[in-house]
Amino acid sequence: MNKKSAVRLFLIFLAVTSILHVVEYYTSVTIHPLVLTGSRWIAWLFIIIYSVFRQSLTTWILVSMIIGVEIGLNFPVFAPNLQVLSKIFLSLVKTIIAPILFATLVVGIAGHSNLKQVGRMGWKSIVYFEVVTTIALVIGIFAINITKAGEGILLPEGFNQELPAVKAQTWQDVILHVFPENIVKSIYHGDVLPIVVFSVIFGIAMALLSEQKKKPLLDFSESLAETMFKFTNIIMYFAPFGVGAAIAVTVGHLGIDILTSLLKLLLTLYAALVIFILGVLVPVALIIKVPIKKFFQAISEPVSIAFATTSSESALPKAMENMEKLGVPRKIVSFVLPTGYTFNLDGTTLYLSLASVFVAQAAGIPLTLGEQFLMGLTLMLTSKGVAGVPRASLVILLATAASFGLPLWPIMAILGIDELMDMARTSVNVTGNCLATVVIAKWEGEYKEPEGEINFD
């Protein structure tokens, strides 16, 4: 069977499967559950056949997500057992973060760029990050005020979730978190920003050394960087298993009851994120003349990984590699992308502003637009550095709600669908940060668009 035949058969079975499900759910006609399940599995079989012909890691990841959804729906009791696969994948990815950040930043600062350029990239990045995240904040607040998704919300009967322990953060705590007291401790906890700060200072110190003393460390850092990119390529072959398992666990855990009761909130978030992408990120890409098709090819795999694992950190190594292939110099990628994981959380900022107003609406507490923006700005500041931790934004939301005297029970309702919301906001975080690397590269006049087709697998 060739590729065209596989695609044709898949489309036929997909159409038949869709018709059967529409008939079952929207008419009085009853179709045997085995027929519905069997038709879906046949459609998925053809997807698998197509992916074998495709020989693409991105395709394999997308197919594994589909299979994961099916496993979660049909085997909800078994699905949680697959969590070990997703944890293995995340653990493997976390081993890459510190060495790849350290090596690429040191080489970029000490080997290829001058210290003035580092300062220039720093202020340009911060300005761009804060402008974009502020727009995301505004979109989130206006979206929830339009839909009023929190009004009339009730917890489903029997719903019980434990809220995570929360320690309120002051602005001093946020600033202190930026600077590593112990680099080994930062590596252990996966704190991206302290690793970046240490690596930047280390790179500056190396740049001030004589050529004779600098060369051995520079050669080591270059070799380490190349080794970690090869390491990333090896680990990515396990990505379909880790991603599929993560989706299966999520779908098996959620069910549909809590989703139904909070569908309005979920749709509000997804609609707001789409508006942000189409109204902010796409215009920025068009203004600076980003090669749109190649850009989306470059981010498809990192975004898929982030979507399934709900962790931006898991997509970082592949995102760095692909943005370099897209024509962004390594010294800019290695500086802007990890920095963006702290200061440019577009999806998280939009979600937090939306969710905080949702909590007030659900509790029947009226807030002026000024109070909403103040709460949103507080959330934006306290959310810095949460990109590597799945659902850490929920902890930030709890702390802010307590600071503003809002009740916690509406957050328990959000907790029920937080995984689905985390998938969307994390994907937007990764997309926004990847675009930021191209913006800064263009701003610095160092972007070189590659000619011809690029293999991002």
Image (cartoon, helix red, strand yellow):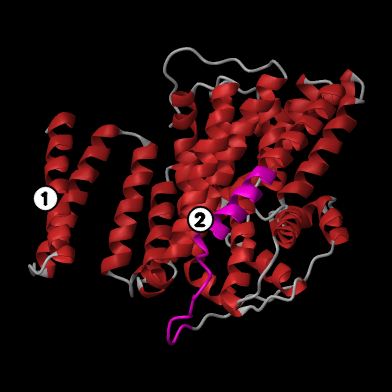
Residue type beneath disc 1: Val
Can see residue 191?
A: yes
Q: Which residues are magenta?
A: 133-159
Identify the residue at image location x=70%, y=21%.
Answer: 443
Indicate whether 3 appears above or below 287.
Answer: below
Which residue is most to the top? 451
Question: Where does residue 377 sit, x and y in percent of width and height?
Answer: 74, 55
Residue 103 belongs to magenta span: no
Q: Nearer the viewer, residue 379 or 303?
A: 379
Which one is earlier in the sequence, the residue at label 1 or at label 2?
1
**Residues under numbered marks 1 and 2 in contact, where contact means CB atoms less than 8 Å apart:** no
Left or right of 213 in this view: 91: left
Indicate whether 352 appears above or below 360.
Answer: above
Q: Nearer the viewer, residue 368 or 271?
A: 368
Identify the residue at image location x=59%, y=53%.
Answer: 142
Q: Which residue is mark 1?
A: 16
Question: Where does residue 91 sit, x and y in percent of width and height?
Answer: 56, 55
Say which element carries label 2.
helix
Residue 153 belongs to magenta span: yes
Left or right of 303 in this view: 210: right
Residue type beneath disc 2: Leu
Question: Where does residue 275 sit, x and y in percent of width and height?
Answer: 51, 43
Say which quarter of the image contains residue 440: top right
Q: Which residue is mark 2?
A: 269
Residue 373 is tagged as: none
Identify the residue at image location x=52%, y=74%.
Answer: 413
Identify the residue at image location x=34%, y=42%.
Answer: 60
Mark 1 packing: few (<14 Cα in 10 Å), some, or many (20+)? some
Mark 2 packing: few (<14 Cα in 10 Å), some, or many (20+)? many
